[in-house]
Image (spheres, grey):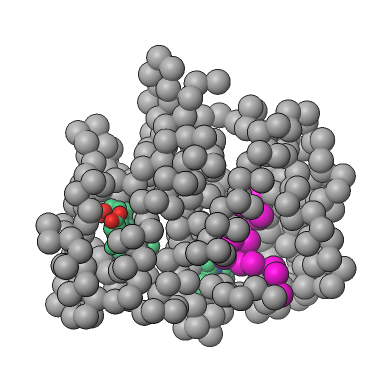
Amino acid sequence: MKKLLATLSLSAIIFTVACNDTEEGKDSSNTSDSTSSTTSSKPTDNALALLQSNCFNCHNPDKEAAVRVAPTMADIKTAYKADELTGSEFAHKMIAFINNPTEENSHMPEAVKQYGMMPKLNYKEEQLEAMAAYIYKNDIGSDEWYIQWKATKDQPAGTNTADMSYEDLGLSIANRTKAQLGKNLMGALKKHGAPGAVTFCNTRAIPLTDSMAKVLHAGVKRVSDQPRNPNNQANEAEIAYIKELKEKIAKGEPLTPKIIEAEDKVTGYYAIETNKMCIQCHGNKNTDILPETYANIHKAYPADKATGYGEKQIRGIWVITMDKK
Ligand code: HEC
Ligand code: HEC
């Protein structure tokens, strides 16, 4: 619990810094961000800030971290044999996995066994390129990098939200909430197994989403057309979008977000897809979900509709509501 609060307040710090930082590129000097000169110089693209708020919650570089839910980026770099690759080969290899985290695309089968498969997160190509370039260029396993990171991790370069489109802002809010929720879920799975992790989802999913909403100054909801928790029931407009997404998946089309502008609010819808990890709680009742897990699910959610999913299906959507700028 203490750990959870610590992580949340870290995000709070990141965001506070982000919100107050309106000057372009203001902080980039103290982040050793070697990518800013080769990619766009917009602070929204700042690679270290992106890694910090989207990846390091799970891929914690802290060597003394009490709970580890994913390998460090330095371990990944070694497993990917980065030193034998050019920067663009490395980026290509890494991005291919992130865009489609499956066993076939994994180069770290041991990590998948130890931690479970990384959940799918949706990033823009240029953001992924910037993050990959940062990892490639910086010696992120070295004591030097680590000491510098420890000293500056609470003050990353500004993510200038004022410059972001609503679509990108909503995506960043959804991704950060997802990363935080995913980190805690993976930790609970590792510690208690699927039957025990049901309790985590049951008691923590909504409060965690709510506190991220507070930190990120936005409305954050996870809804489904087949909800487990009836409070997560999608409304008519949301169901219509979920239907669109399912049709897109069937046709192999990209799952583009939807933005709806009202008078003083903007709402963004973003797809939530299943992967292998989800199936142990959302798959077939008789074959994928352990009887013990299902018993816990059924006890907490007698009206559960969230089973029968396979991998790469639409489990629901993020609904992010932002104030108009
Ligand atoms: C919710 C937790 C979580 C978040 C957030 C997360 N990861 Fe991961 N990631 C994992 C886990 C667990 C593994 C190890 C299992 C695996 O390889 O899938 C992993 C593995 C990886 C791998 C190696 C994959 C392989 O098997 O070849 C790469 C590359 C990676 N992550 C990059 C990233 C980047 C970049 C970000 C941020 C944009 C990120 N991850 C965010 C949990 C996470
Ligand atoms: C340990 C079991 C477990 C795992 C693993 C799990 N979930 Fe869930 N999921 C739950 C429970 C329990 C709820 C209800 C949470 C609540 O009360 O808000 C839930 C709720 C949800 C919701 C909100 C809508 C609803 O049905 O209430 C979404 C969306 C969702 N899960 C997606 C996923 C995805 C995607 C994955 C894999 C990346 C996943 N879940 C993995 C147990 C799990």
- Quarter of the image where one finds residue 135: bottom right
Q: Residue at x 55, y 63 (%)?
A: 2
The quadrant holding residue 291 is bottom left
> Measuring 47% from the left and 71% from the top, which residue is drawn there?
187
Judge whether 133 appears above or below 256 on screen: below
Horizontal relation, residue 285 to residue 86: left or right: left
For image coordinates 77% across by 31% down, the residue present is 24
Q: Magenta stretch containing residue 62, yes or no?
A: yes
How far across and how far down the image is residue 102, in percent? 44, 70
Q: Position of residue 94 (x, y in %)?
A: 61, 64
Q: Main secondary structure of the magenta part?
A: loop
Taking 302 as reference, is 190 above or below it? below
User: In the displayed structure, would residue 111 be above or below residue 244?
Assistant: below
- Quarter holding the C terminus? top right
Residue 34 visible in the shown view: no
- Tell me: 102 left or right of 87: left
**Residue 118 in sight from this viewpoint:** yes
Q: Position of residue 26 (x, y in %)?
A: 82, 35
Give yes or no for residue 61 being in the magenta stretch: yes
Give the number of marks: 0
Q: Indicate left or right for 238 with 277 as reference.
A: left
Q: Residue furthest front?
A: 2
Seen from the viewer's position, the closer of residues 271 and 72 is 72
Q: Given the current orientation, which residue lies at the most extreme left position?
A: 303
Residue 154 drawn at (x, y percent): 73, 52
Q: Residue at x 19, y 49 (%)?
A: 230
Ligand 2 quadrant in view: bottom left
Task: Report the magenta residues as a range.
Answer: 50-63
